[in-house]
Amino acid sequence: MSAPHRPPADATTRFADRVDAYVRARPDYPVAVIELLRTHAGLGPGTVVADVGAGTGILTRMLARTGATVHAVEPNGPMLAALIAELDPSSTVRTHRRPAEATNLSDASIDLITAAQAFHWFDRDAARSEFRRILRPSGWVALIWNSRQTDSSPFMAGYQQLLDRWAPDHRVVNHQNVDASAIEEFFSPGSVRRHTADHHQVLDVDGVCDRLLSSSYAPPAGHPDHEPMLAGLRTLVQRHGEDGAIRFEYRTEVYLGRFAP
C-alpha cells in the first residue's frame, strides 16, 4: 500500500480569492455524465446525493435538476456562498460548510457521493472512512474531472507551454497526479470503472483569461508573473482564435465505483 496522501495545508482556502473567475469561466459537465449516473447509480427522484467538494455548485445544480435530493458539502466559505447565490429560490439543495473528511451527514444516509474537480484535494484515508460511514450499503461513489487536453489543438498545446513557463506549480497540484492505481486503492477491495466523454467550452479572450485565473496555481494580481502570463495568453488567443473565440477542450473522466461490504 502506498504512503498516506495528505492534501496541501491550504486546500480548503486555496480558491477563496478566485471565486468570481471560477463562476464565470469553469465548465459544466457533459450530459453523458448525468446519464451515466442515472443508468448505473440510480440518480433521479428519490436518490439522496452528497456532492462533496461542491465548490461553486456547477455539478450540484446539474444533479438537482434530476429530482434527486442533493447535499452540497464544501469547506470554503466564499465558494459555498457563490453556490448558494446561484441556487433557484425553490431549490431543495441543502448546503453544508464542511470538509470531505467530516461531512456531518448521517450514517448510511446517502445513495451516491460525487466529487467533481475535488478528490485530489482530499485526505484520502480520512475521506474513505467518511464516505463508507455516510453511504448506504449499496451506495456509489463517482470521482469526476474535466481533464484539460494538452495537445488536442495548437491552442491547447500552446496553453500547456504557457503554464509551464508562468505557472509551474500546476504540475504539483494537477489532479492527474492521482493516477488509476491510487483510485483503485481508494476503492479496494471494492470495484471501480473509468468512463470518459469529450467536452469543450467556447471562450472569448476575457473568458480564457478568467479560465486561467480560476486555477489555484495561476500567479494572482500583484505577482510579477501575472501580467506577463496574461499578455502571453492574449497573444495565444490572437494567434489561434477564430473571430476572437477559442475552443477550450477537455476529456471528462468519471471513476464510478463501490466499496466492498
Image (spheres, helix red, strand yellow):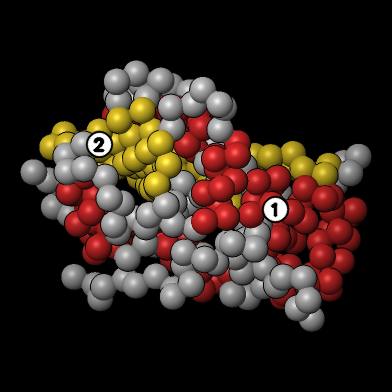
Q: What residue is at 43 percent from the left and 32 percent from the top?
A: 93
Secondary structure, mark 1, is: helix
**Residue 60 drawn at (x, y percent):** 47, 36
Q: What residue is at 25 percent from the left and 76 percent from the top?
A: 3
**Residue 11 drawn at (x, y percent):** 46, 67
Quarter containing the C terminus: top left
- Relative side of 24 to 182, left or right: right
- Relative side of 101 to 129, left or right: right
Q: Is residue 250 visible?
A: no
The mark that comes first in sequence, 2 or 1, is 1
Q: What residue is at 42 percent from the left and 42 percent from the top?
A: 95
Rendered position, 259 above or below 234: above
Q: Could you tell me the amino acid type at mark 2?
A: Ile
Which residue occupies the foreground of this view, 153 or 141?
A: 141
Residue bearing mark 2: 110
Q: Is residue 178 visible?
A: yes
Rendered position, 106 above or below 151: above
Which residue occupies the foreground of this view, 128 or 31?
A: 128
Task: Mark 2: give few (<14), some (14-19) or many (20+) Cα within 10 Å.
Answer: many
Task: Mark 1: give few (<14), some (14-19) or many (20+) Cα within 10 Å.
Answer: some
**Residue 162 drawn at (x, y percent):** 73, 68
Q: In terms of image quadrants, where is residue 191?
A: top left
Which mark is on residue 21? Answer: 1
Rendered position, 5 above or below 252: below
Judged from this view, the residue extending furthest toward the front is 89
